[in-house]
Amino acid sequence: MIEIERKFLVTSDDFKTESFKHTRIIQGFLNTDPLRTVRIRLKGEQGFFTVKGKSTDDGLKRFEWEKEISKTDAEALLNLCEEGVIDKMRYEVKQGQHVFEVDEFFGDNKGLIIAEVELEHEHDSFEKPQWLGKEVTGDIKYYNSQISQTPYKTW
């Protein structure tokens, strides 16, 4: 239940031709308190209810609990979310032993592209794709909960 991930900005669209899967994601937040966020996500035809805890100081680790819910329930709960629902396309790219999830944002966050890689241990090494840019792990402004409140277009 502890999520370990690193986040990066993306420097080109090359990830699109390297991806083996892409899925549309609509997500909103019932709670964006930094100590705990409660997210509702519609990922393709699947719904998810997720609770995330506060990140460690370096931003690498935090508690995450997720439960699959019906598409109908997810759609209903999205209507209760705070303002600033996120719309994005997630691309999955295999690089070495890891899969990078690359999120291309739309709407008020158009132009923002973030790649994440989940790790087993915080000091795991991984192969970096050429399109991987500046690391933003731990920079709270790149958290989806913050992007929903302060969209990329306002930066």
Image: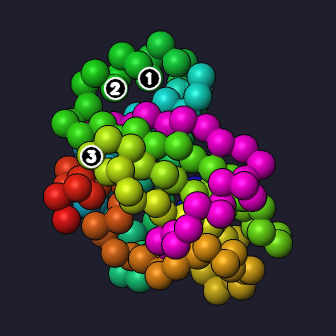
- Residue 28 is a magenta residue: yes
Q: Which residue has dot 1 on it?
A: 74
Q: Up-down: is 142 above or below 22?
A: below
Label 3 vs label 2, nearer the camera:
3
Gap between marks 1 and 2, in whole Å? 6 Å
Name which quarter of the figure residue 68 lies in.
top right
State the residue at coordinates (41%, 19%): 75
Asked where in the image residue 30 lies, by quadrant, the reply is: top left
Does the stretch in magenta take in 126? no
Q: Quadrant of residue 93?
A: bottom right
Label 3 – label 2 distance at C-alpha: 17 Å
Instruction: Give the distance between the C-alpha atoms of the residues marked 1 and 3, in whole angstroms.
Output: 22 Å
Q: Which residue is mark 3?
A: 108
- Within 10 Å of disc 2 (Cα), the crowding (few <14, some 14-19, many 20+) is many
Q: Is residue 39 left or right of residue 4?
A: left
Quick one: label 1, few (<14), some, or many (20+) residues within 10 Å? many
- The quarter in which the C terminus is drawn is bottom left
Amino acid carrying mark 3 in the image: Asp
Decide whether the magenta segment is chiefly helix, strand or loop.
strand
Find residue 140 and report its horizontal and vertical position in percent: 30, 69
Q: Where is the N terminus found, in terms of image quarters?
A: bottom right
Under circle 3, the secondary element is helix
Who's the residue at 47% across and 13% down the image?
Answer: 72
Q: Which residue is mark 2?
A: 78
x then y, percent, for residue 22: 65, 42
Q: Which residues are magenta?
A: 4-30
